[in-house]
Image (cartoon, rainbow, N blue to C red):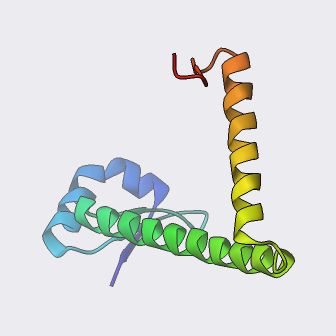
Amino acid sequence: MPKTVSANEAKNRLGSLLGYVSEHGDEVIVETYGKPKAVIMSYAAYEEVQALRGQAQRADALERLRRLQERTAARNQDLTEVAAIEIAERVSHELIDDLAARGEIRFDRDGR
């Protein structure tokens, strides 16, 4: 179970709190005026939290892409594959031309 300390106590006892976290593998909740403001935890626990956060972000992005794909598919039911390829080629040429015009890339469409 996490230990709870005031911010003032955390400031005065940081070294011993770090030892507590390391020794017990538990967290220390730091409060200001009785409200939790921060947590002192082991670096391994922090890495786990970061990994979980990354997984959640990737899952969220994937779900948003799936919803976008569904909306796009619904709007383009009558679009043939040939027409879709023509649109994709036109957009990519416009993008390349725009980047080249701004000097962000060098591109020779003729391949010379």
Residue drawn 44% across and 71% down? Answer: 55
| Residue 39, image x, y percentages | 42, 64
Asked whether, in this view, residue 112 is left or right of residue 95, the answer is: left
- The image shows residue 91, relative to residue 22, as above or below, that is above
In this view of the protein, which residue sits in the foreground, 65 or 89?
A: 89
Q: Write down the quadrant of residue 79 in the picture.
A: bottom right
Asked whether, in this view, residue 109 is left or right of residue 40, the answer is: right
In this view of the protein, which residue sits in the foreground, 88 or 23?
A: 88
Q: Write down the quadrant of residue 61 in the picture.
A: bottom right
Residue drawn 61% across and 77% down? Answer: 63
Q: Write down the quadrant of residue 45 in the picture.
A: bottom left
| Residue 62, image x, y percentages | 57, 73
Q: Which residue lies furthest to the left in this view?
A: 23
- The image shows residue 102, relative to residue 76, as above or below, that is above
Residue drawn 65% across and 14% down? Answer: 103
Residue drawn 21% across and 66% down? Answer: 20
Asked whether, in this view, residue 7 is left or right of residue 66, the answer is: left
| Residue 56, image x, y percentages | 50, 73
In this view of the protein, which residue sits in the foreground, 111 or 96?
A: 111
One can see residue 41 in this view: no
Q: How many labels does the image show?
A: 0
One can see residue 32 in this view: yes
Asked whether, in this view, residue 77 is left or right of residue 23, the answer is: right
- The image shows residue 35, relative to residue 92, as above or below, that is below
Task: Check the picture and name the quadrant holding the N terminus.
Answer: bottom left
